């Protein structure tokens, strides 16, 4: 679908974005009222208390209670913004996760200056990773000795997801702090080395949209763009089937499944 980027917010194509947009609108109206209100008050004071013959400045403190009440009202409204509006939106978005089995679970790993998307494949299990195994063709260091990795797919800057399905993304980074941002899905999460932060969302319309890095991360920051393709479940399956399974051993199709999975320490 064609997106119109006007002066307002970009279209919201996520299931959770309405609450965020509402919050942004309320905040903007509040800020306009404050900005214009204080501006008018300042102008009023500049004119009323200007220097002119026959008037002497009074250095006694203001007896009016009005400024105090105005401050209390502003603070009260800010508390309402935080507790009444922000907390519920944040809590729903950050805490009420769907079950893994009902969602597509992926890892999103920022790296100067690309987004790596790690899909666990049909078994739903991510292959073991080890930084020692990292190389140009395997930046995430996925261990091809681990059978869980054999159906894994690593996609660079191409994030394909099915529409109307919950997506859980574990966001992290390999080098410096990045931020995974998809404006039309109202997503923004810092990607921090050494941390894996889960986010979840659901796209409600198909299309091809921008992924941007929202945290200045080096000279290539402005080029750190990916693409999220929201498509029907069938198209997604088709795309996934076409992706190379690079960790699958050549003989894996014939080899019997290992008797016991050995988990290596560390
Ligand atoms: Cu970045």
Image (spheres, rainbow, N blue to C red):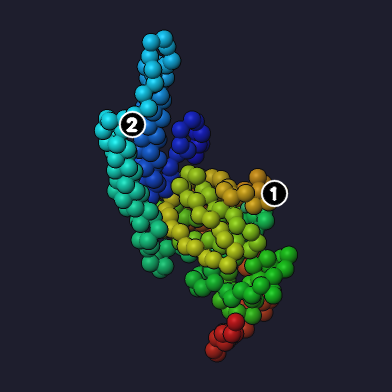
Q: Residue at (37%, 42%) from the top-left corner?
A: 23
Which residue has dot 2 on it?
61
In terms of image quadrants, where is residue 80? top left
Q: Is residue 248 above or below residue 228?
A: below
Residue 40 appears in view: no
In terms of image quadrants, where is residue 242? bottom right
Q: Residue at (50%, 33%) from the top-left corner?
A: 4
Q: Quadrant of the C terminus?
A: bottom right
Q: Nearer the viewer, mark 1 or mark 2?
A: 2
Q: Position of residue 234 (x, y in %)?
A: 48, 56
* Between 70 and 207, the one nearer to me in the picture: 70
Distance between mark 1 and mark 2 Cα atoms: 56 Å
Within-10-Å neighbours for mark 1: few <14, some 14–19, many 20+: few
Do the numbered discs 1 and 2 sit on residues whose CB atoms are within 8 Å? no
Residue 124 appears in view: yes
Q: Position of residue 252 (x, y in %)?
A: 63, 79
Residue 7: numbered disc: none
Q: Residue at (33%, 31%) from the top-left corner?
A: 61
* Between 91 and 160, the one nearer to me in the picture: 91
In terms of image quadrants, where is residue 174? bottom right
Q: Is residue 110 above or below residue 69?
A: below
Q: Is mark 1 within 8 Å of ligand 1?
A: yes
* Between 173 and 152, the one nearer to me in the picture: 173
Which residue has dot 1 on it?
220
Q: Is mark 2 within 8 Å of ligand 1?
A: no
Judge left or right: residue 106 versus residue 28: right
Q: Considering only order in the chain, which callout, 2 or 1, is on the residue closer to the N terminus?
A: 2
Judged from the image, the secondary structure of the residue bearing numbered disc 1 is loop
Q: Residue at (39%, 45%) from the top-left corner?
A: 20
């Amino acid at each position: 679908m064609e997106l119109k980027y006007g002066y307002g917010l970009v279209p919201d194509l996520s299931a959770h974005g309405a609450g965020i947009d509402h919050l942004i609108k309320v905040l903007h109206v509040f800020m306009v009222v404050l900005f214009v209100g204080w501006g008018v008050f300042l102008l009023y004071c500049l004119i009323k208390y200007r220097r002119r013959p026959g008037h002497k400045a009074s250095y006694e403190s203001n007896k009016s209670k009005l400024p105090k009440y105005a401050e209390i009202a502003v603070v009260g409204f800010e508390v309402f913004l935080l507790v009444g509006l922000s907390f519920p939106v944040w809590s729903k978005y950050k805490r009420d996760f769907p079950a893994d089995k009902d969602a597509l679970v992926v890892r999103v790993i920022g790296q100067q200056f690309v987004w790596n998307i790690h899909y666990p494949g049909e078994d739903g299990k991510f292959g073991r990773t080890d930084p020692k195994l990292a190389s140009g063709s395997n930046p995430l260091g996925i261990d091809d000795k681990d059978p869980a990795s054999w159906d894994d797919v690593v996609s660079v800057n191409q994030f394909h997801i099915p529409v109307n399905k919950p997506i859980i993304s574990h966001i992290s980074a390999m080098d410096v702090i990045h931020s995974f941002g998809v404006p039309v899905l109202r997503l923004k999460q810092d990607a921090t080395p050494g941390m894996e932060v889960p986010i979840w969302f659901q796209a409600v319309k198909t299309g091809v949209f921008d992924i941007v890095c929202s945290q200045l991360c080096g000279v290539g920051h402005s080029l750190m763009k990916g693409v999220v393709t929201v498509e029907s479940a069938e198209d997604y399956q088709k795309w996934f089937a076409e992706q190379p399974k690079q960790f699958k051993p050549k003989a894996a199709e014939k080899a019997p499944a290992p008797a016991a999975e050995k988990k290596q320490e560390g």
